[in-house]
Amino acid sequence: MPSTKKPPSEKHPMATLGDGALQTSPGETNAGGKVLHPCHATALRKATRRLSQLYDAALAPCGLRSTQRSILRHIHDAGELTMGDLADILVLDRSALNHNLKPLERDGLVQVRVALKDKRSRRVRLTPAGREKLAASQPLWREAQRRFEAIIPVGQTTELISILAEISSPEFAETFIASPGVNRA
């Protein structure tokens, strides 16, 4: 079987840090075969992209992407909420949320309106078509969940969800930013 190691003359595809250390993904090795320290952000981004691709494919028959279903689900669970609250829940900035809501609004799945009490605020809610689309996605989503749990057992899944919830929390961000050695440029 041919070796998958790169010759020392080839540059690593990842950028180097200021101290010259390479940031890699889990399991990557250098030319000498030594396992390199993984970059947590890169590992999470790769996993997120892969899982999004798989869930998008699973949800395709109902015409939703996993991000769209997530938005519909959060709105459904809240009933109606402000754009700011929805952005906070989804850990998105408001411009990214607006970008993601536009096709849902265009397709008549959500309604965005000016709040009655505060005209500067906008509120978002599901339309009847949005509730129907979310209901249609439910069996497809359940099947994707079943497939995931067939590979990653429920106990590990529960631990993973707990860790990811911690990472996505405002408290994690505050602690990370306040940690010594973090560049606050």
Image (spheres, helix red, strand yellow):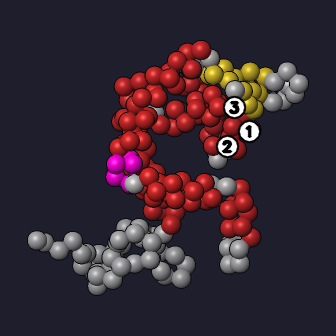
Q: Which mark is residue 78?
A: 3
Left of 75 or right of it: where is 84?
Answer: right
Left of 120 or right of it: where is 46?
Answer: left
Amino acid at circle 1:
Asp
Give the camera-side residue of 9 and 165: 165
User: What's drawn in magenta, residue-wise?
Assistant: 148-152
Find out whether the residues at labels 1 and 2 contact each other: C-beta distance under 8 Å. yes
Give the camera-side residue of 9 and 122: 122
Q: Callout 1: 10 Å neighbours few (<14), some, many (20+)? A: some
Left of 139 or right of it: where is 100?
Answer: right
Looking at the image, is mark 3 or mark 1 earlier in the sequence? 3
Q: Quadrant of the N terminus?
A: bottom left
Q: Which mark is residue 37?
A: none
Looking at the image, is mark 2 or mark 3 earlier in the sequence? 3
Q: Callout 3: 10 Å neighbours few (<14), some, many (20+)? A: some
Give the camera-side residue of 88 and 184: 88
Question: For the point 59% across and 27% down, which residue is it?
Answer: 102
Amino acid at circle 3:
Ala
Q: Nearer the viewer, mark 3 or mark 1?
A: 3
Q: Which mark is residue 89?
A: 2
Does 143 sit above or below residue 151? above
Give the camera-side residue of 161 and 17: 161
Residue 120 is situated, as x and y percent measured from the top left of the image, at: 84, 29
* Marks 1/2: CA–CA distance: 6 Å
Q: Callout 2: 10 Å neighbours few (<14), some, many (20+)? A: few
Which residue is label 1 attached to? Answer: 85
Does 123 sit above or below residue 4? above
Q: Quadrant of the C terminus?
A: bottom right
**Residue 45 visible in the shown view:** no
